[in-house]
Amino acid sequence: MHKFIDNIISFSLKNRFFIFFLTVIAVVAGAVSFMHTPVDAFPDVSNTKVTVITQWPGRSAEEVEKFVTIPVEIAMNPVPNKTDIRSTTLFGLSVVNIVFEDRVDDFTARQQVYNLLNDADLTFPDAHDAKGAAHPVTHGSYIPLMMSADRTLRESAYESLYSSYRQFRNTFAATLGAQNKQLKFFAEARRYESALEAALSANEVPTQVYTNLIETVHNNMDAMYKYVALRKELLDVDELHFSDLYVPIVDDVELTFTYEEACDIILEALRPMGENYLALVRRGLSERWIDVYETPGKRSGAYSAGGYGMHPVILLNFQGKLDDVFTLIHEMGHSIHTYLSCANQPVCYSDYVIFVAEVASTCNEALLTRYLLDHAKNERERAYFLNHFLEQFRATLYRQTMFAEFELKVAELTAQGAGITADALCGIYKELNAQYFGDGIALDENIALEWARIPHFYYRFYVYQYATGFAAAIALSQRILDLGEQGREDYLGFLKGGSSKPPIDLLRGAGVDMLSPEPVEDALKLFDEMVDEMAEACRKLKAEKH
């Protein structure tokens, strides 16, 4: 050992310039690595804390304590991994601090507090219909109330919801502001150009995809304005309000389906996918992959779950409505995607990232829509199907892009060092609604608060994937219908890819390049054409009445 060390010393002394040169290279390489290594250079050692701020102007400290501070403290008690709850109550102001254990990250803490405030602590006054009858307003009942034909009830429910959110606007603003400040800190510490780049890098998605989406939608706003004008015309109102957006334009079509009929419909709608795909769907339907009906204690909604070495399973709460048929084909799309990924990839690549997760399910829905339109029994039924698809389009491609732009604007404001206040957030959100809906709808102060009830804003630039996934699915479904076997084989190759390649490359292999604006442009062109179809169908129906 000593001889070895002596040899190294001897070599170094004889080759001083060479050793000096190697040392300089090592120092430079170390400095460069330090500058570019994604590490937390300045770790935050303080406790994880979330502050809930509530203003109640004009109320005494005793009233605020009794009706605000104490209820918030009680609502926060179920929060897991908290260490302490501290509060301060002043004239017209309540401040509650929830302190968490060191192992709880800030993202999780804020999401937990937001969810409890939103789900447990927020209550809403009853809404009243045109006859004066009271209707309870909850998170679950709000959208059904907004779909009511009674405009008085819709407006009352709309006001009820946002009157409660207005009380906590500063709390939600502080929570969302803290979220963005932390995103900014981690992005800078890890040498990213922006919080957006940091968030998208996990799925290997370039920021160009995000900005292309927003820019392309901006260039195709006319179709949205045309749809808003059509909705105003068909609802026959002097002024369209945001409380009028969910009520069906065609509402006198009653369609019900048995589960067996729904299975037959989706099998027919998926014929363009080819026999191999259909065989898997039949297998899922016949081998009881699906828990179909609602039962006591069963969770609500629907989902598909699966994993390596097992077949997927689907949870439904089938009620026999048109939406249930769409849900069945949607979840089956997820399940077949999971099955093919696991069957064709090693376990390390068998899962797929969220960027492509909704493509397979939405592609199935697009094929179902085309099938229903082609097999509509009459013009009224066709108009009903068009209305269903247009609303899905508006809510997914336009609305989620608006959400994505809101997230981006808030992140840019944070990067500039500006304060994230409730007034600033409401101002941004109101301007975006004016831009996305145009002059055809009456802006109000309530819609400026909608950002406060969107939980996805705490998911780090998540919502854009709904819009890009929808656009990719529309493009892929059209390609399957137009190209036949070639389009089908390309698409099945995408489903089998799992996460073996970056999602952009997987989609490009299926014939859709999300780095270009073309998929979004094509989807919006289809929306424009369907708005015209809807207008023509409804005017025919109106003429028949007269």
Image (cartoon, grey):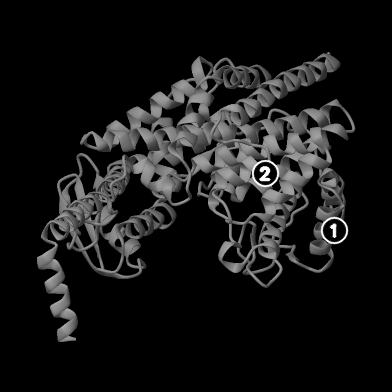
Residue at 85%, 58% (x, y): give it.
Answer: 279
> Callout 1: 10 Å neighbours few (<14), some, many (20+)?
few
Q: Quadrant of residue 291?
A: bottom right
Q: Position of residue 444 (x, y in %)?
A: 42, 25
Q: Quadrant of residue 524?
A: top right
Q: Position of residue 255 (x, y in %)?
A: 81, 42
For label 1, the residue is: 279
In the rendered view, does 529 fall on the left or right side of 139? right
Residue at 78%, 44% (x, y): give it.
Answer: 488
Residue at 14%, 62% (x, y): give it.
Answer: 15
In the rendered view, does 51 fall on the left or right side of 315? left
Task: Identify whether 164 is placed above or below 291.
Answer: above
Quadrant where the image shows the C terminus: top right
Q: Amino acid at mark 2?
A: Thr
> Callout 2: 10 Å neighbours few (<14), some, many (20+)?
many
Quadrant where the image shows the N terminus: bottom left
Q: Position of residue 310 (x, y in %)?
A: 69, 71
